Amino acid sequence: MCKFLLFRFLLLCPIKIGSGFNFEIGQRAHEHLAQLIGMPTKIQQLIDTYRTNKAFPHNFEPPDRDIFLVFGDAMLKTFPHDLIYYGLEDGTFVGHQLQPRQGMYREPGESGYKVHIDTATMKEMQKHLSSCVDKAGGDIPCVMRSGESYIECIDDCNVVLKCPDELSQRNCSQIRNNSADEMFDCESSIKWCTSYKIETFTDNHDNNIGFIPRTAFCIDSSGKPTQTPGENSDLGKNGLGNCYNSNGVTPVHRNISGDFAYCGGGGIICNTTFVGGYQSLNYDPRFRPWYINTKQTQKPNWVDPYFFFYPQQQMGITYSHPIYTTDEKGRSVFTGVLALDFTLQGIASFLTENYKNSDTIVAVVEEAEPNYLIASSTGSTGIRQVMLDNPSQPCPEIDEEDARVQCETVRIPVSRLSQNPLDAAISQSFEAHKNENFPENKLVPSRVDDLDAIYASQTRTFSTEEGIEWKIMILSSVDSHSGDTIMPGEKEFAFLVTPAVIGFVVCSMLLFLFAKGRNQKEFNASDQRFTEAFLLSCALLNAASLSMIGPNTNAMCLTRMWMLNFFFVLTLVPLLLKSYRSYKMVGNKSATTRRRLVPGIPFAMSVVAVELIMLLIFTFAYPKTEELLEYDEDSVTHREICTSGGLILVQMCYQVGLILAGCILSFKTRNIKMEYQDNQQLILAFTNIALVRGLTIVVALG
């Protein structure tokens, strides 16, 4: 290690400058999401203003259907969302969808009525029973299938109770001190809800249960239902066209007469309720998740991403806002829910249009486990079709009818994204941030082996009071710092290998000569065991310095930590023993001849044992490599360095202590008899070692 640090200090090798990281991208993506997610609040404010100004004269009741559809058309053209709609406590549903461009409407009332029973209720519901349409435009009865849901009223849905949310359930009479202001605030926060329950129809071979359909309509350029030839406005086509039934062939021609609520109530009969209607579904807003959740919480909220019923395979999110009216008692009564749908494609389009062909990758991921993808600039959707009986297998290419039975569409966690080669960078970078608890003010590196690249990434939290919790990830590939490793072909390679090989060869040759001349008097008089141990350790230390060649992997860093430190201490041991033995001989009158046996074996073993214990502790207690990103306004540089959690400081203290001990011992024995004058060489050896080690400490700490 010391040789390597000394070479870096002396050579002043150039550093490879990394590529830049645009920190503004995360801010722009955050602002775009905030703008998109903030639109429902603006639309809600507009609707409140419209209601205050009596723009909806019937307060969202069925006669306001066409007014809302025209309003929805303006909202869809002004604000980028996909569907605006509302559902009421009486079952009314009105909606305007962008793609396909259509209106939707459901009359108020309760499904689940008996079809073949001659009662006043059945006579009243007969108009709904015959209001469904098939694919070719023919009238069919609106009969429920087994497993479908319907609403069953409690006391004709006229009972008004406190809503189930926390504020409404408070007992205002228990407010301490009976403060008038506190009492008023408490009572004002109470919301009141009608009572009903959701039932499921079970087929008992008596198909006599009817439903009130939700009908899809063709609409004109202003948003009103139409079936007039040449007036159907479909944004998926060029210009205006005709209104066709679901088969795409038969023109729509529906003029069903009846005293429908849309006509104005009070027994008024009209034939315009189903004009332009081409599709019928059993749909009641009151048993949909977006409606139920809003009624329970009495708060604006976002529904987690889910698959829309139509268009199929589209992922989206829904914003829901409660609607209230004031009854004759002055109570705030929950009337229904206003909702807006956003497809995730809108977010994906922004990312792909701005970053698909750039060096930056942007992805939005759910913070909650299992961290599903919302959108990314790579174009990946985060969904795929899989076999219904084996979700690990992709759905084969088969005809549509078989696919409905055998396959299903599922979401993919970001950890398993594989729709684009760049998805590997998103997956691994997200896991790296997750392991560090998503630091927002720090760039986190990740090595993507599939792309043979290193990415720097940043995360930003995107959250709203209505429940959205997302992470915005910004990734950019960066260059690696070339000065942290020595690889073949670099100029440092020759400076490291040359002295290491020369040192190894010289020490090995001297060791060979000493071993060969073991029985000669001159060699025997030179403390052969000390010398051979020292030469062997020197040869191994020189060879160990070659471990500095290669990348900084866990295995290589561990190898360097052991070899360089252990062999350095092992090289010092013979010198210490020789100095220690000479020190013991000072003042000993019986020491007239050079001792062959070493009196400090326990001391030597303790020195080596302490080194082994330290290396073992740091082997298991600390990581071996650490990836760093160094960045300024112009560049980002990736570094992968060997780390040991303070081992270098502990080793420096220990090794410097051994060197100082050797210097002191050899200095005290400097005036020993001439026949032991090799102690002067020990002083020189320890002094040189102390100088070199001092330089390496300066380099390491500098």
Image (tube, grey):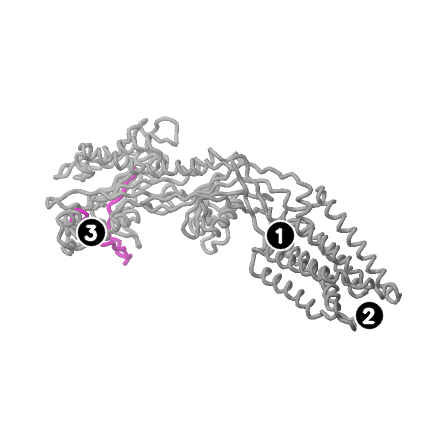
Q: Is residue 190 magenta?
A: yes
Dot 2: what SS?
loop
Give the residue at mark 3: 168
Residue 491 spot, x, y in % from top left? 72, 41
Foreground residue among 358 and 653: 653
Q: Residue 397 shows which numbered tag?
A: none
Mark 2 crowdedness (10 Å alpha carbons): few <14, some 14-19, many ≥20: few
Which residue is at the far bottom?
590
Residue at x 22%, y 33% (from the top left corner): 49
Position above or below: 276 against 694: above
Give the residue at mark 2: 593
Foreground residue among 168 and 296: 168
Q: With 239 as the anchor, is 213 left or right in this view?
A: left
Observer-side mark, 2 or 1, equals 2
Tell me which label, 3 or 1, sits earlier in the chain: 3
Q: Amino acid at mark 2?
A: Thr
The CA span between labels 2 and 1 is 52 Å
Give the residue at mark 1: 553
Mark 3 crowdedness (10 Å alpha carbons): few <14, some 14-19, many ≥20: many
Observer-side mark, 3 or 1, equals 1
Which residue is at the far left?
328
Residue 289 spot, x, y in % from top left? 30, 49
Q: With 397 as the anchor, is 544 left or right in this view?
A: right
Residue 418 spot, x, y in % from top left? 52, 46
